[in-house]
Image: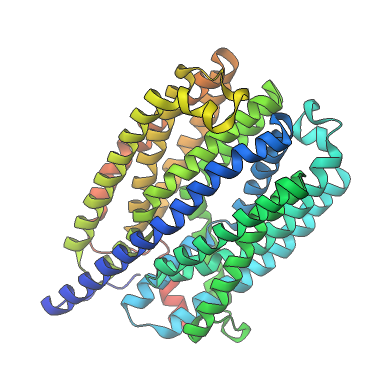
């Protein structure tokens, strides 16, 4: 059983609430630096790459990114589970639990990275690429295969390094992640600039973008270990019972935060590639990039908010948790509505200016369908963040599995009978109908009751060692 939160004293509640508010404000301020840099990097690098590589070759780069994103999903959510566990350990001043959680997560992910690397290397060695990606990619193996090998090596490193971000989130230090993210953007911009002019090949573009991220995360990791020796990985602190609970917890987190990405980014991108070819894949890749770029501005607030809500509920400060949730919903919804209006009004004019004449024929109706999907995506993200923060992961997992299955069916039917626009509109309708209606009620209930741990035994096991 999870421990009930302690009855907070008024002065303690005010002090901890002020500290959480301060950490969120600092995270937002540094996020502007990081997310604005990411947006600027995307705005400049994507059209530059398209002009140098061409739309068809850029479609290969998009295909590689979709594939590597699928590889990244094999993390099974251990990172978010770690952040939630650390936020509760911090609330309870449990340094021993923090040591065992961070060490167990590190060695779990190192082992999983090695296993995933062996399996995926076997696929790249023995499975013909057109069999995976479709007949339209036949003859492109010489460009596609080196990029896949390069990306695979980088993404396996990110398996482990991404835990650093989650550790800092659990310790309410998201601002530091943002600073290192901004440094990674600067490095990536320089590397892409070198690549498109001197090495205009798909594999080097993959190396420039994702290799820069690896370097930034390595620096962040060493800085974390120096500032917080208690989270340095030590095999002596690895605990099999903690790993078991974290693994099962990770499966639930995956369903909450990653299954939707598998269906809506990777599966749909693969479906469009097989049905409509590389040019359509390039356009869908642009929509995905726009989603990630825009959602980053919502995550400026959601990323530091949900661990802070988890800590507040662990301390019994439900009032602060409700206030933080209202602030997140108001900001995120307003951003989504503004994005919809801007895309519909100005999208057909700005898209060809941004990406070139190859995208001048993108109809306003298709952009409106994408904008509707993006609003649904934002609304779901807000509810996901608060469901995880309030410890309702198992409920969220069941609902998200059902929704993702319905979204996949809607995507197949919509693409077959109406094209990409109908596919996006069908996906948005399902999202609004399922998680958009169900989750807000569950969030409201979760913020009114005592805190729950997504895996009730996790904290107990960590303490017991």
- Above or below, 9 relative to 364: below
Placement of the N terminus among the 4 image quadrants: bottom left
- Depth order, front residue of 186/64: 186
- Depth order, front residue of 85/23: 23
- Depth order, front residue of 218/102: 218
Q: Position of residue 421 (x, y in %)?
A: 51, 20
- Above or below, 175 relative to 73: below
**Is residue 392 in view?**
no
Question: In the image, is 68 to the left or to the right of 225?
Answer: right
Looking at this view, name the residue that lies furthest to the front. Answer: 197
Q: Residue at x 43, y 42 (%)?
A: 294
Location of residue 378 (image quadrant):
top left
Q: Position of residue 400 (x, y in %)?
A: 45, 42
Q: Residue at x 50, y 38 (%)?
A: 290
Q: Residue at x 52, y 73 (%)?
A: 242
* Scheme by which the image is coloured: rainbow
Location of residue 189 (image quadrant):
bottom right
Q: Position of residue 198 (x, y in %)?
A: 77, 49
Looking at this view, name the residue that lies furthest to the left. Answer: 10
Question: In the image, is 200 to the left or to the right of 237?
Answer: right
Instruction: Report the number of discs.
Output: 0
Q: Position of residue 170 (x, y in %)?
A: 41, 69
**Is residue 130 in view?**
yes
């Amino acid at each position: 059983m999870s421990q009930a939160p302690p009855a907070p004293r008024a002065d303690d509640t005010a002090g901890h609430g002020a500290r959480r508010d301060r950490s969120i404000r600092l995270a937002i301020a540094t996020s502007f630096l990081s997310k604005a840099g990411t947006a600027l990097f995307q705005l400049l690098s994507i059209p530059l790459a398209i002009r140098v590589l061409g739309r068809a070759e850029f479609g290969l780069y998009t295909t590689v990114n979709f594939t590597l994103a699928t590889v990244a999903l094999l993390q099974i959510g251990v990172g978010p589970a770690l952040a939630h566990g650390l936020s509760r350990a911090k609330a309870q001043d449990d340094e021993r639990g923090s040591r065992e959680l961070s060490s167990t997560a590190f060695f779990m992910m190192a082992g999983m990275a090695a296993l995933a690397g062996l399996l995926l290397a076997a696929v790249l060695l023995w499975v013909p690429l057109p069999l995976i990606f479709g007949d339209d990619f036949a003859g492109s193996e010489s460009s596609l295969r080196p990029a896949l090998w390069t990306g695979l090596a980088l993404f396996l490193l990110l398996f482990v390094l991404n835990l650093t971000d989650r550790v800092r989130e659990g310790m309410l230090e998201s601002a530091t992640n943002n600073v290192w993210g901004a440094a990674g953007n600067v490095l990536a911009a320089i590397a892409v600039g070198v690549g498109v002019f001197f090495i205009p090949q798909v594999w080097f573009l993959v190396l420039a973008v994702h290799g820069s991220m690896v370097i930034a995360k390595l620096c962040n990791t060493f800085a974390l270990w120096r500032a917080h020796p208690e989270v340095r990985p030590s095999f002596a602190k690895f605990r099999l019972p903690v790993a078991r609970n974290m693994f099962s917890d990770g499966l639930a987190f995956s369903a909450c935060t990653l299954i939707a990405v598998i269906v809506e980014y990777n599966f749909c991108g693969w479906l469009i590639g097989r049905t409509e070819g590389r040019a359509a894949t390039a356009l869908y890749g642009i929509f995905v990039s726009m989603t990630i770029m825009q959602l980053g501005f919502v995550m400026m607030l959601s990323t530091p908010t949900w661990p802070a809500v988890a800590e507040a509920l662990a301390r019994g400060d439900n009032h602060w948790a409700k206030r933080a949730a209202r602030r997140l919903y108001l900001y995120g919804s307003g951003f989504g509505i503004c994005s919809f209006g801007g895309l519909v009004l100005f999208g057909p004019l700005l898209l060809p200016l941004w990406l070139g004449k190859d995208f001048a024929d993108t109809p306003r109706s298709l952009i409106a369908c994408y904008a509707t999907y993006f609003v649904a995506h934002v609304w779901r993200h807000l509810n996901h963040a608060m469901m995880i923060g309030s410890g309702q992961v198992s409920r969220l997992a069941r609902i998200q599995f059902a929704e993702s299955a319905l979204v996949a069916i809607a995507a197949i039917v919509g693409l077959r009978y109406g094209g990409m626009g109908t596919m996006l509109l069908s996906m948005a309708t399902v999202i609004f109908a399922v998680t958009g209606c169900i989750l807000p009620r569950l969030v409201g209930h979760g913020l009114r009751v005592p805190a729950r741990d997504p895996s009730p035994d996790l904290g107990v096991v960590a303490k017991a060692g």
